[in-house]
Amino acid sequence: MQHLPVHPNLVRFIEAYEDRDNVYLVMELCEGGELFDRIVARGHYSERAAAIVTKTIMEVVQVCHRHGVIHRDLKPENFLFLNQSEDSPLKVIDFGLSVFFEPGERFSEIVGSPFYMAPELLKRNYGPEVDVWSAGIILYILLCGVPPFWADSDEGIAQAIIRAAVDFKREPWSKVSQSAKDLVKRMLDPDPDTRLTAQQVLAPNIPLGEAVRSRLKQFLVMNKFKKKALRADIDGNGMLDCDEFLTVSLHLRKVNSEQHLPQAFNYFDKNGSGYIEIDELRAALGEGHLDPNDQVIREIIKDVDIDKDGKISYQEFEAMMKSGTDWRNASRQYSRAFYNTLSRKLLKEASKPPKWVDRENGLKSSI
């Protein structure tokens, strides 16, 4: 991060400390919440708002690439507002997976978060273009409320990414301008050679309605559900104080292990029935400022509830935390191990290449 210039949309590095086992980074405190929190809370959603956010993201991407840095983990959770003010700057955080690059240099290590991985990353041959792809995924979600590539398993998500068939038929895409659709298509071009670089686009101010906000909120609440199950914020105030920071540092392996799941399940199962019921989930997720409505809660239970009995058993909770869903927020450690294995499997077993792959000449654009 010290290699990058001071920029209003880059989180500031303060200091670093180390002990025998760890290095601790102290970063600028961002108290304005995540990108999705702010958009859902506003109550008004338009292409222009999405365009402004995308412009900011792409400006950050452009700064990074001009200084020889690929972020490699762009996702909504890694964009925070500095403060609660309406004009607060948006900050990109978490450069833990970033890497220096030279022009023309290619990488093979699979890193990042499943929903936002570019197809060439799964194919182990990528460069800075993967950041533009990830930003395109974010823009797609901002405009319609759900990710473009998803499935009920991690392998399904990866295969959907490899196919790279972007759906513009579902609502509210009929209400989205052609220029916005074109931008999404060009940012999600499966051919990194013809994919857009950091471009700035402002779309017409067309309200997208409550359906988008509802779906976006559902996406957000499911992420909050998983984060709360793996919470590190012991006192629930949304920040880590010094004691909490040390606790997390000392017990990180335990918190991320399977042994933590029963404890996390019991946090939601207040009455000890062995199930997470709608009232319990509503109460737990309503402790913060999000306050999800009953419809959002029911939709979350519906997607996790495998046996369709209207509540979440421990086995269903465990499956949600471990496997991919429409709202998967996979851990970095799990993602790297799984996708390293999966990419080899996909490349070995694929009998037919996607329509945008030419067996002789490599990638070609389908757009």
Image: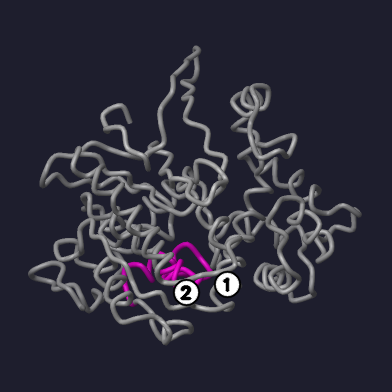
Dot 2 amino acid type = Cys
Which quadrant holds the N terminus? top left
Tell me: 83 left or right of 122.
right
Image position of 89 with respect to 41: above or below: above
Q: Which residue is the extreme one toward the top?
A: 20
**Stretch in magenta:** 140-165
Q: Residue at x 32, y 39 (%)?
A: 98
Residue denoted by label 2: 144
- Residue 196: quadrant of the picture: bottom left
List x then y, in percent, for residue 95.
38, 38
Whether the magenta-drawn stretch holds residue 162 is answered as yes
The picture places residue 133, in percent across and down from the top left corner, at 30, 60
Q: Looking at the picture, which amino acid does disc 1 mark?
A: Arg
Q: From the viewer's perspective, is residue 218 above or below residue 99?
A: below
Per the image, the residue denoted by label 1 is 215
Q: Residues within 10 Å of mark 1 (few under 14, many from 20)?
A: some
Depth check, front residue: 253 or 206: 206
Q: Earlier in the sequence, mark 1 or mark 2?
A: 2
Residue 34 seen in the figure: yes
The answer to whether residue 261 is above or below residue 51 is: above
The residue under the point 76% across, 57% down is 314
Name the residue nearer the viewer: 51 or 270: 51
Q: CA distance from mark 1 to mark 2?
A: 8 Å
Q: Secondary structure at mark 2?
A: helix
SS assignment at label 1: helix
Image marks 1 and 2: residues in contact by CB distance under 8 Å: yes
Q: Residue at x 81, y 48 (%)?
A: 266
Q: Was residue 72 drawn as part of the magenta stretch in this picture?
A: no
Q: Could you say which is closer to the camera, residue 31 or residue 217?
A: 31
